[in-house]
């Protein structure tokens, strides 16, 4: 697959949020931050916005 | 001239099957020709038979590699089947077998090493859930609310979510709070929603705090439903939450 740090950030962030355990989450967050170090501030905030949107849509689906 | 967005390499995953075949044939064909060309030049003094034996050696090497790969695939599949059969057999109904059933169920649900099969996943999750595995109860609730592998049934989904939530599974607690707030599969009840959101926030909010979802977790939802509660209800629920978390802290769940 073509390398895409924004996409990596998106999935790592969701994975970190989905962990049951805080220490597991911290481990995933480390990988996510590694991906974030390759992103510009604008790309980063866009990726974060995508995560929030995904979570809201996903919650709406369970209605 | 290369355009600005052109990639300097070929994106193999974006190629069609035909293009991939052509690429493979050209790469392997060239390698083959070079290999035998060089082989012929080197082994010519030994006669044309030496070159043919070389070709046989190469073919045998590829055939053996292929056979070994297939054998490993076959054994992995059998191992999964045997584990499944062991976990399902009546003589081993324990926590360990519930654990195995949950993980095999997850592999069938997510098509991990086996073809995707929601019905089989639902069957395995149900066996594990009946043995008291909270994660399997949550998964089974999900399958019921999505209607995957079973016919869609919100009431049954709520039954399994509640079992998992009562065992301390924080995601089941979060979902149950959501169902109570919106009145899905049960009658709307802000008091119960407050109770389950509060319990879920104990574990989920610290995890969310490390992500982009900071401040969007169950604590926010709890604060939203809190406005619907009277002061007496609120103090009563807070006491109930305190007692519940004290009773469950003794258990490592």
Image: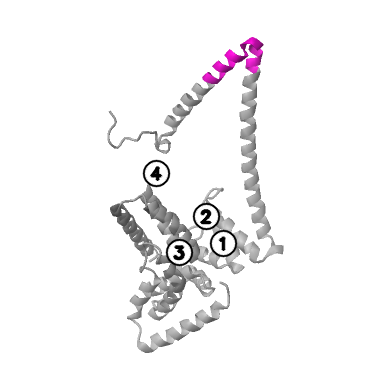
Q: Find numbered disc 2 in the image and state the secondary structure of the residue it sits on.
A: helix
Callout 4–callout 2 Cβ contact below 8 Å: no
Distance CA(mark 4)–CA(mark 3): 36 Å
Q: Which element carries disc 4, helix, strand or loop?
A: loop
Q: Dominant secondary structure of the magenta stretch?
A: helix
Ranked by sequence position, the earlier of labels 1 and 3 is 1
Q: Position of residue B129 (x, y in %)?
A: 57, 66
Q: Tell whether B197 sits left or right of B251.
A: left
Q: Residue furthest bottom?
A: B232
Mark drawn on residue B145 = 3
Q: Quadrant of residue A10?
A: bottom left
Residue on which disc 2 sits: B109
- Where does the C terminus of chain A fall, quadrant-wise? bottom left
Above or below, comparing residue A42 to residue B134 in the picture? above
Which residue corresponds to the image point at 65% horizontal and 62% vertical from the top-left? B97
Who is closer to the viewer here, B207 or B142?
Answer: B207
Residue A57 image position (x, y, % from top left) = 35, 61
Crowding at label 3, few (<14), some or many (≥20) Cα neighbours within 10 Å? many
Q: Are marks 4 and 1 in contact (CB under 8 Å)?
A: no
The residue that disc 1 covers is B125
* Residue that badge 4 annotates: A3
Q: How many marks?
A: 4
């Amino acid at each position: 697959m073509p390398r895409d740090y924004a996409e990596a950030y998106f999935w790592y962030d969701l994975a970190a949020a989905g962990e049951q355990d805080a220490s597991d989450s911290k481990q995933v967050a480390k990988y996510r931050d590694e991906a974030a170090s390759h992103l510009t501030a604008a790309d980063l905030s866009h990726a974060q916005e995508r995560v929030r949107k995904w979570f809201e849509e996903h919650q709406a689906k369970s209605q | 001239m290369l355009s600005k967005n052109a990639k300097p390499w070929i994106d193999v995953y974006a190629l069609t099957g035909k293009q991939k075949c052509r690429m493979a044939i050209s790469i392997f064909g060239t390698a083959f020709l070079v290999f035998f060309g060089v082989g012929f030049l080197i082994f010519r003094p030994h006669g044309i038979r030496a070159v043919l034996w070389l070709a046989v050696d190469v073919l045998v090497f590829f055939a053996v590699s292929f056979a070994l790969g297939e054998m490993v695939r076959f054994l992995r599949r059998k191992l999964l089947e045997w584990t499944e059969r062991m976990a399902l057999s009546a003589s081993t109904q324990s926590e360990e077998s519930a654990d195995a059933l949950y993980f095999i169920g997850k592999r069938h649900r997510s098509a991990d090493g086996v073809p995707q099969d929601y019905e089989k996943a639902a069957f395995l999750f149900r066996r594990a859930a009946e043995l008291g595995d909270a994660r399997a109860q949550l998964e089974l609730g999900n399958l019921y609310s999505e209607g995957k592998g079973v016919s869609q049934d919100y009431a049954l989904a709520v039954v399994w979510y509640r079992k998992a939530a009562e065992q301390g599974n924080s995601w089941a607690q979060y979902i149950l709070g959501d169902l109570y707030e919106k009145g899905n599969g049960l009658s709307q009840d802000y008091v119960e929603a407050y109770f389950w959101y509060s319990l879920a926030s104990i574990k989920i909010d610290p995890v969310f705090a490390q992500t982009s979802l900071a401040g969007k977790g169950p604590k926010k939802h709890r604060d939203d439903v809190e406005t619907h509660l009277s002061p007496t209800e609120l103090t009563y629920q807070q006491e109930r939450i305190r007692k519940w978390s004290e009773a469950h802290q003794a258990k490592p769940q």
